[in-house]
Image (cartoon, rainbow, N blue to C red):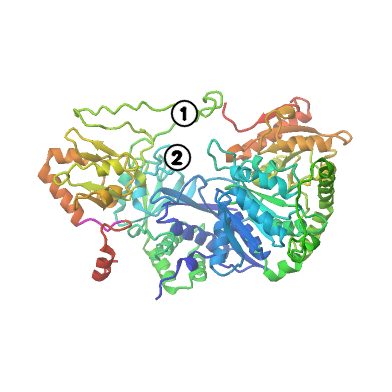
Amino acid sequence: MAPPDTATAAKTIELPGGSGDEREELISGSEAIAHACRLADVDVITAYPIRPYDTVMQYVSQMISNGDFDCEFIVAESEHSQFEIVKHASAVGARVFCGSSGVGWFYAFEALAVTAGLRIPMVAMVGNRALDDPGAFGVEHNDALAVRDLGWMLAWVATAQEALDTALIAYRVAEDPRIFLPCAISCDGAFLTHSQAIVKVPSKEMVDSFLPPYDRGEKQLHPDNPITIAPQVNEDWLMEMRQQNDKAMRRAREVIIEAYDDFEAKFGRGGEPFIERYMMDDAEIVLVGMGTLALPVKVAVRKMRGQGKKVGFLRVRWFRPFPTIELQDALSGVQAVGVIDRDYGFGSPFHSGVLANELRSALYPVENPPKVVSFIAGLGGREVSIDNVVEIAGMTYDAANDSLDDQDTHWIGVRE
Amino acid sequence: MSTGSVEVVYRGIFQKTLAKNICRGIVFAARKEGKIGTAFGRYGDSPERNGIPAKQFAVVSDTEEELEEHLAKYEPVNNDVTIAADDALCKGIESWAWYGLQPINKLLGDGGTLLVTSIQSPNKLIKTIHRKGTPYNLAIVKAQASFSGLWAYKDDHTDVRLLGALAKVAPHIVSLDAMLEAIRDQWNDDLKVAAAKRAYEATESTPVGVDQGNDEVPFSFDLPGWTKMEEGLVIRGMDAKPQDVPGRDGGYVPTRNEVFKKFSTRTMRPVINFDTCTKCTLCWLNCPDTCFDITPDGFYDANMEACCGCGVCEAVCPVKDCVTMVNEEAFEDNDSQWEMWTKDKEGYLAWLTKNITERPARSHGYHHVGQYAEEIADGTA
């Protein structure tokens, strides 16, 4: 018998049980992103290693070497070059993918900052990681959040399935000529990037019916279309350009809703575009968070519901554009909201997390707004336990009853 | 309503694909029974280093909601089964970024099963395993440790043999029928299915009582809080003066971290012939872990608490058979070879010769250029 080769032995095995043109596979969040790249038939992918993002590179290169995927795969000499290369490739009409984590994302910052201004519909994956030093691989959200005001659309996902689906939706939205803005998908390091789950992987045909080819039209850099992109502008022009960016971001909301509607029609899943409402119907208090935090929070909410406590959970799926309307709708009439930030905002109002302060701002015009209490938890990838969530819910109830100051920020799960 | 979890402790590089095959196999098989599962590696590990102990896990539940309780975590505790893919791991494990030696059965739940590939008897193996404080079972799949590789996977069926044995010791996680079906799906190989079935039939468990095993108390400490830690990420250095070893006058034994000893990474150790050593210093200079102690008479004695078995000393030694890497299976303690030699030179030579000539096969790599061709010729490869 011929010895089996490694590629075959270690290859993802198809499982029965997929519906129609979809098949079930046991894959990690990073591998799900790699599948999305393959299904979207991305033309140019650049890579530079950093944990946890580098797992995407591994799966993409494996797909290429197995003959399952054809794209230009360029290993750059830094994150900065990595993002510059795809920026230029996108300008000439290539569908592109890139990504990084933690300080790698920051090393590319000059490139990241200009991508939106040039209206490049790049899709990137941020494998969320703490900013070293000190050396740490675990998840914090401050890395991706750093681009929140620069014209990037930002999504946070909670499962490998959502990672795959959101990446496909991201291409559709980013490359819509009404938008042409970059989009980053945040995947929590370890809990999502490195954990294998059963995922429905659609066929290329299904994806083709949802995602049209990238067409840059008159903005395509090409010898037959002689244009200049990004000349010097200074004070005479820049403010108008920024206004254009702002208008594009404002239009994104409707385009995202359209994309989710169509995704639901084609794939039978997707859910509410901007937020996930979990046991919210009669909730007195609501916990709010992003990413894989949802897993322990949902378990805790179910337990508390079992004890008769009316606690709900709201997961923010898109941070940019910020779902102001949806959050106002979902949280009006709630007594108190406990926001769990897996990030920090040193010196910010109330010393709160980034999400908490954004949410306070969004709820400001609401009549009789709920109390908003900010909690910092799970930094550096620390596990957020079910007990932590129960503690947070208890303190949020206290804020509702005026026995806890809602203008202070509480660190949960930190050793004294 | 039930959830089962399995921990696979393996050696970096050599067994990474093996561990992955086992954990994925468990989830696939459970899927055959309508369950849902997840498989993942311990994120803080760095299994891209030769021989370093690392972990992968499989968790399977009846429902998705139940599984959610076990997600977004680094490692499940109270596992139903802990698999040690190399019986040398039973002495304890120190992974990268861990805090000292951890017992192999630390994350095994009460009444769970430690499943080991070994050719040793249960009684001999139990002596090396730390006492757990609660009863558990030991099951053995008769096999040498399989260092089947990462980049090229040498398929010796260890993956499916362990999967078959798992169905025997933990049928509540997955049945034999489901396991065999999953193996057939995954590899389409009757031999692998037969190997799993035979392992299932041959595997038996031995109960291990609370008073059985190694009574060494593993190192532990309390992590400090933010009010106790020094600000600005400052770590104070150790006193770098050489160690004062009782009974030794002269020589040089460097100060070493008493807690992080690294030897559990080792799958082979250097055996040194002090009679032929020319004191050329190359082993001492090239050792990446500063593990050679300088003896009072100017020899270089590889400290077995500090050596992680990389084999650089053997590679740089210019004298034939002066430093020879020998499979860790041949040894039970970390005693000083130089002290053995000074006490009884003839006895040491006999011990050395026996280890070099009758040693178990190397765990990985080759001793000399051309060894692979020789092994092919005599059919041992």
| Range covered by the magenta-colored residues | B358-362
- Indicate the secondary structure of the residue bearing disc 2: loop
Q: Residue B302 vs residue A408: left or right? A: left
B302, A188: nearer the viewer: B302
Q: Nearer the viewer, mark 1 or mark 2?
A: 1
Residue drawn 63% across the image and 62% down it: A35
Q: Nearer the viewer, residue B353 or A43?
A: A43
User: Label 2 neighbourhood size at 10 Å, few (<14), some (14-19), many (20+)?
Assistant: few
Q: Is residue B292 left or right of residue A94?
A: left
- Image quarter of residue A59: bottom right
Query: Residue at the spot x=36%, y=35% of the render?
Result: B217
- Can you identify the residue that label 1 sits on? B235
At x 60% / y 33%, what residue is drawn? A413
Query: Which residue is disc 2 drawn over?
Result: B98
Q: Is residue A381 above or below residue B356?
A: above
Alpha carbon of mark 1 to alpha carbon of mark 2: how far? 17 Å
